[in-house]
Amino acid sequence: MKLERTFSIIKPDAVAAGRIGAILASIQEAEFKILGLRLTRLSEAQARGFYAVHSQKPFFEGLVKFMTEGPIVVMALEREDAVARLREVMGATNPANAAEGTIRKRFATNIERNAIHGSDAPETAAAELAFFFTTADLI
């Protein structure tokens, strides 16, 4: 297997609840190398741009509002099979369906406030990484 990069966000709900350290620990325990990490806050325009793929869906406006309500942590991660492995570590989108021990089972409130985002494919990861990081940002 070759190394792969993926992208993740610790969402405003988890940041506000003081869960950054615990979530990072889970990611590192899963043997991810952190290439880039930044605490930031999305503007409305940035949130709309990042989630543009969902713009026609009924939850879009609520998603934009949620993602701009407070700080987030953006991460560039690397390991073998990174996209699939991070999705396993995160757990199902709906925390009620997430496996025990996953980030969402441990820290998410509901399907909308689900603590963490992770890219769903290598191509998506490349686009999402480029949205937040330049090549010079990544170690």
Image: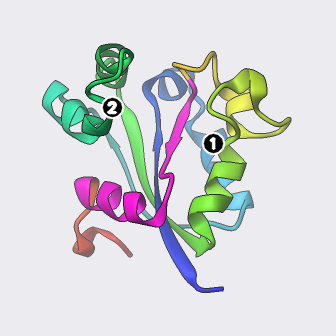
Characterize the local packing of mark 2: few (<14), some (14-19) or many (20 or more) Cα atoms within 10 angstroms: some
Q: Quadrant of residue 84?
A: bottom right
| Residue under numbered circle 1 | 23
**Which residue type carries mark 1?**
Ile
Numbered mark located on residue 36 in the image: none
Q: Is residue 5 above or below residue 17?
A: below
Residue at 21 percent across and 31 percent down: it is 48
Residue 43, magenta (yes or no) = no
Real-space Cα separation, disc 2 to disc 1, in angstroms: 25 Å
**In what quadrant of the picture does the C terminus appear?**
bottom left
- Residue 80, horizontal then vertical, whole percent: 63, 76
Image quarter in which the N terminus is found: bottom right
* Location of residue 117 with respect to 119 vertically, above or below: above
Whole-percent x and y of residue 79?
60, 73
Q: Is residue 117 left or right of residue 137?
A: right
Q: Secondary structure at mark 1?
A: helix
Name the residue located 48 percent from the left edge and 70 percent from the top edge. 5
Residue 12 drawn at (x, y percent): 43, 25
Which span of residues is magenta-colored?
Answer: 114-131
Q: Residue furthest right?
A: 100
> Residue tagged by mark 2?
54
> Would residue 66 be found to the left or right of residue 85 on screen?
left
Q: Is residue 25 visible?
A: no
Please indicate whether residue 20 sits to the left or right of residue 98 in the image.
Answer: left
- State yes or no: residue 127 in magenta: yes
**Residue 83, image quadrant:** bottom right
Q: Nearer the viewer, mark 2 or mark 1?
A: 2
